[in-house]
Image (spheres, coloured by chain):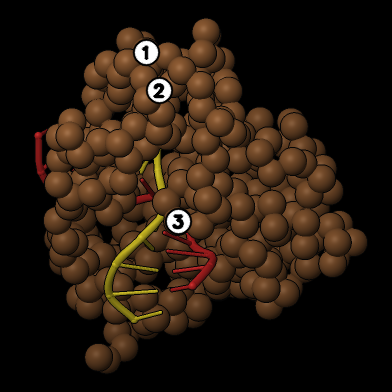
Chain colours: A brown, B yellow, C red
Amino acid sequence: MSLPALLDPGLIRSRLLRWYDAHARTLAWRVGPGQGALRADPYRVWLSEVMLQQTTVPHATPYFLRFTQAWPRVEDLAAAADGDVMAAWAGLGYYARARNLLACARAVASQHGGVFPDTEEALLQLPGVGAYTAAAVAAIAFDRAANVVDGNVERVISRLYALKDPLPEAKPLLKALAAGLVRADRPGDWAQALMDLGATVCRPKQPLCLICPLAEVCTAKAEGEPQTYPRKLKKLARPKRYGVVFIIRRGSQIALVRRPDKGLLGGMLALPSTDWRSAPWTDADVTPPIAADWVKAGQIEHIFTHFSLSLTVWVAEGQLPDAIWTPSRDLGSLPSVFLKAAQSGLGLNYRRG
DNA sequence: CAGCCGTGGAT
DNA sequence: TATCCAAGGCT
């Protein structure tokens, strides 16, 4: 693999920052362009970056507002009960983020005196903070000249250079090319400018090259098919799995259980369930958690990242030892797959909140 | 290091 | 309906 000819970094930097000064989006956690680290609260920057991992801005925004309302400072979050934080995260997905979020807040509170470390290296040591998040917090909150590379940046750079190597192998090269563009005078603005461009102009599909400040220097645009970058290896088909979940009613309440901390939906509330296996369940296969007069009351489909799930919902009246009894109108602490299943079994239309 | 780990909106 | 994919991290 050979390095593509380097484009003029000065030209790219000045054009993109000028564009950002005029077009930066207003986001709940964002400090406006040119403000540097003057008003950027590291806690809010970190919280937003964790929430935005593999998550869209519209999805993350209401969660960010609720979290900062409930826990305005990192010490507040560190002092929160595990169950309250997991419940507040319900519906946002990738629940290991919430467990690591709490571990990180508690590490900052207990090991750093409640003050976020201000170097990329130290940030990288915190739970749930990887290469991207460490660089982003260092740049946005602390004005460090960090090389912030996320999916947006990879897409923008791959198009600028029309890089033919497919992801994920191309990641190290893309990161090296991005490093050549980082500017030391406005690191936070530069990082956010690159990501904003990727999110709003240099989009995965239908890039808006007509209004792109980098169109004149973009190799992929010159070649005519910028939307084909970055090239990617094909993904495998998603397997199908089946399960049965159980709604045990006691008056207006239903029985929930807490899932183990590791693995799928770890640490979250859940409906009691069979295994989720590749073969459909027949009635004779199913061993309900209690003996009762079970009725098949619902059925849902749910898509996870690496498998799709078909759940049948059985309902009965009864008691369950050690259950977490929860009003059936107050199921917002459940992950979406169980909220969907519970509402199906109870004859309700799926909606959160 | 490749697989695991959610969700909902867009196309 | 099928596919993609969004400011990734952990193991």
Question: Tag 3: residue type?
Answer: Gly
- On the question of residue A85 being in view, the answer is yes
Q: Is residue A26 above or below residue A279?
A: above
Earlier residue among tags 3 and 2: 2
Q: Numbered disc 2: what chain?
A: A
The image shows residue A135 at horizontal and vertical percentages of 60, 68
- Label 2's element? strand
Asked whether the beta carbons under mark 3 and mark 1 sit within 8 Å of each other, the answer is: no
Q: Nearer the viewer, mark 3 or mark 2?
A: 2
Location of the N terminus of chain A by quadrant is: bottom left
Q: Which mark is residue A247?
A: 2
Is A250 situated left or right of A309 in this image? right
Q: Is residue A173 above or below residue A145?
A: below
- Label 3's element? loop
Q: Quadrant of residue A303?
A: top left
Q: Which mark is residue A263?
A: 3
Q: Nearer the viewer, mark 2 or mark 1?
A: 2
Residue for badge 1: A346
**Residue drawn where x is 75% and y is 32% of the image:** A70
